[in-house]
Image (cartoon, rainbow, N blue to C red):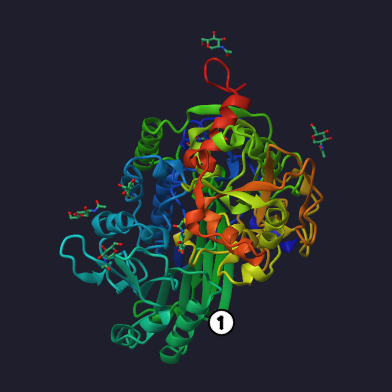
Amino acid sequence: MIERSRNIVISLVFFVSVSHTAQPSAPAPIAAPLRELPWGQLNFLHTTDTHGWHGGHLQEPSFSADWGDYISFAKHLRDRADLDGSDILLIDTGDRVEGNGLYDASEPKGKYTFDIFKEQTIDVICSGNHELYKRNSSENEFNKTVPFFKGNYLSSNIDIYSPVSGVLEPLAPRFKKFTTKNQGIRILAFGFLFDFKGNANNTVVHTVEETVNEKWFKEAILDRDVDLIVVIGHVAIRSKEYDLLYQTIRTVHWDTPIQFFGGHTHIRDYKIYDSKSVAIESGRYMETIGFMAINGLHTPKNDASNAAAELNFARRYIDNNLYSLRYHSRKNESTFTTEHGLQVSRTITKARKALELDRTHGCAPQDFWVNRVPYPSNNSIFTLLENGILPSQLSTATRAAEGHKGLVITNTGALRFDIFRGSFTKDSTFLVSPFTSGFRYIKDVPVQSAKRILELLNNEGPVLSRLPHANDLRSRQLGLPSQMDGLPTFSRSEADNFEHIRGDSQAVLEDDQDLTPGYTTKDDAGTDGDDTIHSSIAFYDIPNCIQAGIGFELTPDGWGSTFSASVYNDEPDVVDVIYNEFIERYILLALEYLGENYEENDTEAYLHGKTLTDIITDWVSVNWPPDDNGSCP
Ligand SMILES: *[C@@H]1O[C@H](CO)[C@@H](O)[C@H](O)[C@H]1NC(C)=O
Ligand SMILES: *[C@@H]1O[C@H](CO)[C@@H](O)[C@H](O)[C@H]1NC(C)=O
Ligand SMILES: *[C@@H]1O[C@H](CO)[C@@H](O)[C@H](O)[C@H]1NC(C)=O
Ligand SMILES: *[C@@H]1O[C@H](CO)[C@@H](O)[C@H](O)[C@H]1NC(C)=O
Ligand SMILES: *[C@@H]1O[C@H](CO)[C@@H](O)[C@H](O)[C@H]1NC(C)=O
Ligand SMILES: *[C@@H]1O[C@H](CO)[C@@H](O)[C@H](O)[C@H]1NC(C)=O
Ligand SMILES: *[C@@H]1O[C@H](CO)[C@@H](O)[C@H](O)[C@H]1NC(C)=O
């Protein structure tokens, strides 16, 4: 209560107009009670795992600001720092690529995003795992992003075979030391990637354990003329990699403040290592701008005046919308947008136009959720898939038309984002189902075995325990089979950010009914981290995989605690087992466990290798057609 009266401003201003600088089709932000930024001596803004969402979220008002707005925002905070003599630094911890049409829809991919991204001044930046999956995407880092952010791009544990010389060299400098502009804080900074193994062979990722034993690292941390150590990384803040870095640095610097910035698991989180060391992780997809403030840092310049000040850290997770950004920068509708920010927003608009991302394929009659509703249910995206989309689209395959019945199985992680009521655009296809793997099948599998595959894939049983990263079946990350190493188990950690339906519940604010649903983060510092006060969202467990019958009916008897098998009507003796290629090795392993031995060479493309994305798009165009003008009511 005290907390609220001191730190929370409930604004009476409502934005009734749609005048804003975000993308033209973005929804206006919704006024909401906000917590102030805990501005300090040294401040940070942190983005991570933006995955191409630099145009913002065009169907969610809470996250509808774009990269141009972030540029305006940062400018105002830099001005504030210059005025009051504090400092502000910007951080980005990787996975800037893959996951949004703005990046994925162009040929080559990222044709527009590199030039958009580089418009922001970023003080310390590093690579994620997604930058390294493909040879050409890591070369883009080497050719473009590293030079754009010259000296600020750090690569403590990644090497690349230079596309120019062919020689293995650090992707970027291993570390840097710099002094802040106004306070004169001497900072030693590193930039890491977690122990990732799925990279293309033109890069080499050294494990953190190897790296802390390297000569350059040992020497770097011997520097005593340092007021703060900043470790940024595409690394989960609760990970063996960061634990090791923390311990190693503490053996040399027993009480130098250490600030970690992390990413990769797509959550909002804050970890307290000790009274002088903390870590923040700032979500995903441009939903969140992380804010950190540190007070009480000793520097050569201010040591006398600051000697008594006690070191403290404070964090805030900013919802990336214009309402929050204007409020925190003390600007209004007419003073917020800078010329530079406006230019970048316009560049994004032009790129989206060139890529035709707003082209409407169909009109969704309602929302379909990934895990905000129970499965099965009428507004579950998986129920839509198994009762509607899959049976209808796959039955057009030649095999099905010839009368061969089929059982199609897909992992729930193949659907990465919700479908919102209204326009289903080209952009939506990349958000909902970005995978490029096609459907394959094994012909004439005995039905007694085929019907048990789902049960094996959904129980955390013998099949899954033989495969590393089995949770990836449910994980809404991008990837191909060869890329599964190191992908996070995202659905769980995402849910940890919210009130999990089977977890403990958070105290409900009295005026809950006035709040919009959104992030209600719990972390090591409590429940007051989010800038916007939201009502909590319930998240439901979903199975790893779902299935549908092609040419015959399935009656699911519920997935319950065992994700059990199904009862079949009109059961054939043999069925084609159809699956998306992503899960091929799981399917083969499950069949082997059931005594059916199939090899890769027993599999063939189904529906000419159409992808789930194609199938959904085709179904949407036919079943939810837009009006004659290609728009939605
Ligand atoms: C990499 O090359 C492939 C094949 O030429 C192309 O489709 C893709 O767009 C390229 N990706 C990038 C990041 O350049
Ligand atoms: C990067 O630059 C090198 C040298 O100019 C070039 O050979 C290579 O194709 C470039 N890579 C990409 C992905 O554009
Ligand atoms: C990477 O793999 C390609 C083909 O898969 C091979 O031609 C090349 O020599 C490999 N490069 C390195 C550096 O191992
Ligand atoms: C925005 O702020 C400026 C400067 O404080 C003020 O002159 C202007 O009237 C404000 N505009 C709106 C729409 O509130
Ligand atoms: C789901 O939709 C079906 C068919 O439209 C309807 O009969 C059923 O009542 C709905 N169930 C729920 C829980 O809304
Ligand atoms: C399929 O592959 C297996 C092992 O990889 C091999 O033993 C078998 O001969 C192959 N079958 C055909 C028909 O090529
Ligand atoms: C399509 O656009 C035309 C011209 O703007 C308009 O007259 C017509 O009513 C629109 N049709 C529909 C179905 O909205």
Res. 632 in view: yes
Q: Nearer the viewer, residue 243 or 309?
A: 243
Q: Quadrant of residue 134?
A: bottom left
Q: Quadrant of the C terminus?
A: top right
Residue 118 percent across, percent down from the top left: 32, 51
Amino acid residing under circle 1: Ser
Residue most extreme to the left? 165
Residue at image location 54% in from the left, 42% down from the top: 612
Residue 59 percent across, percent down from the top left: 57, 37
633 is higher (above) or lower (below) than 591: above
595 is higher (above) or lower (below) than 304: above
Instruction: Report the side of 392 relative to 241 (left or right).
Output: right
Disc 1 beta carbon < 8 A from ligand 4? no
What is the crowding at mark 1: few (fewer than 14 residues within 10 Å), some, or many (at least 20)?
A: few
Residue 515 percent across, percent down from the top left: 72, 46
587 is higher (above) or lower (below) than 254: above
**Which residue position holds label 1?**
275
Q: Nearer the viewer, residue 495 or 133?
A: 133
The secondary structure type at the circle numbered 1 is loop
Residue 97 percent across, percent down from the top left: 41, 52
Q: Quadrant of the N terminus?
A: bottom right
Q: Nearer the viewer, residue 228 or 496?
A: 496
Q: Nearer the viewer, residue 104 or 592?
A: 592
391 is higher (above) or lower (below) than 495: above
Residue at image location 67% in from the left, 71% down from the top: 462
Count of picture labels = 1
Res. 84 in view: no
